[in-house]
Amino acid sequence: SRSYDIPGLLRRLLVEVIKAACQDQLARDFHFEPFKAFQARPPADDSASETFQRLHDELYASDAWIAEQDKLDRLPPEPGCNLPRAIAGLMFWSDATHVSQFGQSKMWPIYLFFGNLSKWLRCKPRSRACHHVAHIPSLPDNIQDFIRSHSNGKSGSTATLRHCKRELFQAVWKRLVMDPDFLHAYQHGVVIDCADGITRRIYPCIFTYSADYPEKVLVATIRDLGQCPCPLCLVTLDQVHLLGQVADERIRIVKARVDSTERISKVQSARKIIYQHGYAATNDRSEYFLKPESLVATENAFSKALFANFEFNFFRMLVVDLMHEFELGVWKAVLIHLIRMLHTLGNDSVNEFNQRFRHLGNFGQSTIRSFAYMNTSDMRNWAARTYEDCLQCCIPCFEGLFPEPYNQHIIRLLYTLALWHGLAKLRQHTDETLDHLTAATQLLGKELRFFTNDVCPHFDTVETPKERAARERRTQAAMEKSAGKKGKEKSSPGSLPKTFSLRTIKLHLLGHYAAVIRWFGTTDSYSTQIGELQHRVVKSYYRRGNKRKDYVRLATRMQRRGELLHRITEQYTPLPDLSPEQHYQMAKSVKHKIHIGDLVGNNPEEPALAGFLPALKDHILGRLFDRPFDGEEGKFTDEERDQILILNNILYGHSTLRVNYTTYNMQRDHDVINPEIPSRAFIMVEAADGKTRFWYARVLGIFHLQVVNTTSTRRIPQRMDVLWIRWLGEDPEYVGNIGVRKLERVGYVPEGPYAFGFVDPDLVVRAAHLIPSFIYGKTDDLLTRSLYWDSQDGDWENYYVNPFVDRDMLSRFLGTGVGHTHPGCAPVSLTSANVIEDEDGEAGAEIGSLDEVGHDGGLEQVGERSCEDPKSSGKGGIESEVNSETESEKGSVDSDIDDEVAEDLGLADDDLIWEFDYGH
Ligand SMILES: [Zn+2]
């Protein structure tokens, strides 16, 4: 056999990384003992008893960790050792990336994080919790020369190159996990004086591996989009659209992928055929062993190192990836197709859609960012979070644009998508919310099949103008490349038809979320976003430094100076005077004075100010006499009102109010209410009538005033804070809640005694995210001409209450947040009402064409990958151009790293030698 050297592997020994990590300052916050957390819930009534339900969030509070610790505790002690035994929870990330947007520099790092550290610390990109353990080299360009020189001048096929790439990837991992020290530590532990002053015997344990689909396939040594495309189970491609059906849920359990001696021997048999008998990388004889489970003829490093002795099942570590699978996957594909459908209705619909988005405004510190300066339908340069914002707000923007009955189906689909996304992204789950997620997954499967089979065929969808332009650019570029200068003008065929298909692995993967969260904790803990943030840090080093120098040198030198850098680059500026122990905060300033007499006297026609003073006094009396808040101030007599003096008749106005609250996952957060900004002016208060959960109001003014109670013996002025508000009420004709999967709809209370009022800021739960119901338009019926209209031309007739704006809000509407108190709220049922009948299970596959959703070319078939196009294999089903790192682009990490750098890194400059043979 002949060997071929690939230079440029940089790695650190895992045991060294583990030692360093456990001794680092950060490790003082490490958790070494797993635990289960529970939520205690008070008894429903006197006869019942307190109930407990499990919380799922951190890795060290997960079943996965507890199971490993159990195994550890059952091991016989190491001879002469009575040190406490603990786990170092390894969480790997890898992702090939470009270092600069236009340059050729590429990198393919493997990052390691420790699950012992709380995700809150671990997931901050500058927390220095990330350890670079290796940089994977790419196949050098001259690999073809080598192959030709050994095969009578024949070039290696794409399949051969792909095989080489897999071999290379696994060879790198073998260097890491088959390191004797590491294996010894895996079995016997390694004694470390940890940063908290306790000496422990630490056992490394691999829990998760986060990567996007093309990279997961490399890790799992399975075929990219093969007949069994899922790294977690043996679902076949013609079953992937059955998400959420009983049979589908069964496959995931019964046919879960597990490592086994049979799997290993199948791979060995196939390798024998290739390496000893000299067949090509793909041949019918080895396919006999591999194809049924879409295996590949590459040894798996994790299996080789850890299966025989530790029964390690490497498939299980390949955790779900919300960003690529949903935000940039299924949701993006649905959105693109909806935009195509909008285009079939004409430009007016598209413009209307864009205009609605421009009305939304922003919300929270960066919860929803404004769409005001873009055409939403273009989705230009959108990041995953823009798609997320769009999903969270899009229902009112789509409403009514499509004709019935499609409109209602689409709205229901969008609601289900937003609900699923919110649940899957919760940072803390309970058993109850995981049940909700399972139910939402079933609903989502049904809605998507219904959409594909019963909605999409009624629209003759073609490429959007943007897709068409992109395709034409690509064709042009390809023609220039292939035909050189003579590129003849091909007549443009116009916009190509585009259909929507569910035959995509990303859809199937959504069904694995609930189980993965139950086992490893919540998705934020192992999101690929963390790795990408780390990339951004490395890229910023790259930009800061001299680009000619290798980024690795910069990245690690910067890391060396971490402590210093940490302080300099930390850009977090705390809001002044944030005191979270107070429920709300209003400025003390007395600069902005409003004389009540002038305010009312100067605006005699203003309906909002009719009865302003008596209402204010009633509000004050209610609070002084401690009347429970019930939405209407008790009627007090004029005599009683006269007992109240407002000092100098002056209100002190403020521009903002900060409302602090405890989030569903017991963190602190706050909203800033600003009456001047429509999207930030709404508040929600706990409803007092028990019929609905919350009441909503628009804040018109934020005031404080000095009040004297003349009946009191001391007659000392006391400060009182009030919000002047305009109430919104439920539309009695309409039902909207999570159970029926419709947004709650509210509208301003019509002019009259209940339209305006005052509220104690202490009662504000949070800012509410209300989105105008665009289809009902504006009206001037609710209030005669007023300065307090939504705008010059009147008020929005209705608003929708958005429960999806953030996870905290969703938890409030579900009634599930651990950090929330919901007196007497009924739990939401997701399975009852408004469920469409599921169609016959098999129908879905037939109607959607094999067209890949959202894929640039749109012509590629999903299926057993043919070997013609090396560019295509990096792409999952619903990938598209925005996120277009293809396999071949990922290929080459610059490999010329000089010794100095390697030394600087503390990396072993470990040229990779790996052996293979080719057929003649
Ligand atoms: Zn699966």
Image: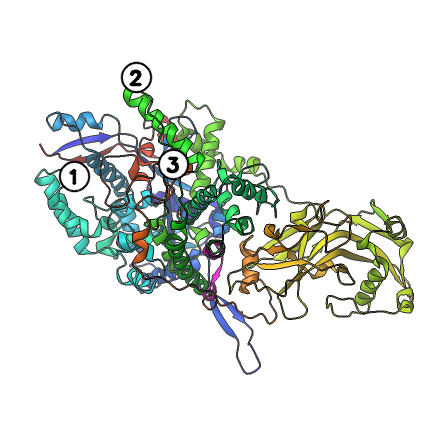
Extent of the magenta region: 409-433
Which label number is shown at residue 884? Answer: 3
Residue at label 1? Answer: 281
Judge whether residue 77 can be spotted in this image.
Answer: no
Looking at the image, is mark 2 or mark 1 earlier in the sequence? Answer: 1
- In this rendering, which labeled residue sits more in front, label 2 or label 1? 2
Mark 3–mark 1 Cα distance, whole angstroms, equals 27 Å
Ligand 1 positioned in quadrant: bottom left
Q: Secondary structure at mark 2?
A: helix
Q: Judge: label 2 CB < 8 Å from ligand 1.
A: no
Which label number is shown at residue 167? Answer: none
Residue at label 2? Answer: 486
Q: Secondary structure at mark 3?
A: loop
Q: Is residue 561 above or below residue 258?
A: above
Mark 3–mark 2 Cα distance, whole angstroms, equals 29 Å
Q: Are marks 3 and 2 in contact (CB under 8 Å)?
A: no
Q: Quadrant of residue 686?
A: bottom right
* Amino acid on which the number 1 mark rests in the picture: Ala
Q: Quadrant of residue 332?
A: top left
Q: State the residue in front, 356 or 917.
A: 356
